[in-house]
Image: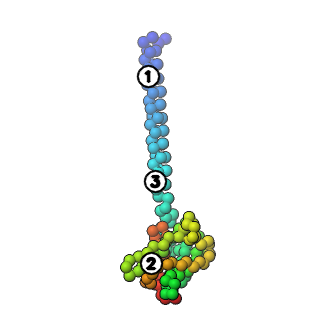
Amino acid sequence: MPSIKNRNFTKKAVSDVITNVLLIFLIVTIVSLFGFLVNNLLKDNLEFSPEISCIKMQATPPITIEDVCFNTETNTTQAVLKSSTIKEYSVGKFSMILELNAGTEKYTCGNSCGSCEVMSDGETKKYYLKNSVAPSKISLIIDSCIIETDTILSC
């Protein structure tokens, strides 16, 4: 039969083990919670990054420039864009950058805009871009990736 002195030592040893297990559990919980919060923070900040690489988007573009010209009577650039029927990448918004003599002008089109919507799959749509000077080139950009650049001629 163990003496009273050994019984107190055994209770103290069990108490230390339980304390250590609880501390380890608490540390693992805090690290997991911190990792979850950091992951959600990074995911929110990277929401607008491309889901696929720029090279793959250029190889199979979701939108292409079919025709583009500058109408000197109305001072508008008329861009005819076509959406691909094979969608590997959903487009929420895109931009068109016009190269002018004095710089560039950027036009953004997205489903959140009221007047300019992204076309649906396989649809061809004409966009009118108002500018006072005839631009020389147009670039189609999706998620900071230049998909296509074309020369603008007179209509």
Q: Position of residue 20 (x, y in %)?
A: 44, 30
User: What residue did someone put label 2 on?
Assistant: 98
Q: Which residue is mark 1?
A: 13
Q: CA–CA distance between discs 1 and 2? A: 76 Å
Helix, strand or loop at mark 2: strand
Q: Secondary structure at mark 3?
A: helix
Task: Give me the C-alpha separation between circle 3 and circle 1.
Answer: 44 Å
**Residue depth check, mark 2 versus mark 3: number of the one nearer the observer:** 2
* Amino acid bearing label 1: Ala
Res 134 quadrant in image? bottom left
Q: Where 154 sits versus 139, above or below?
A: below
Tag 2: amino acid: Leu
Q: Residue at x 43, y 17 (%)?
A: 9
Mark 1 or mark 2: whose residue is earlier in sequence: 1
The residue that mark 3 highlights is: 42
Disc 2 residue crowd, few under 14, some 14–19, many 20+, Cα 10 Å: many
Question: Is the residue under label 2 in contact with that under label 1 (CB below 8 Å)?
Answer: no
- Which numbered circle lies on residue 136? none
Please state the horizontal and vertical placement of residue 59, each as a whole percent of the image: 50, 75
Against 144, residue 76 (above or below) is below
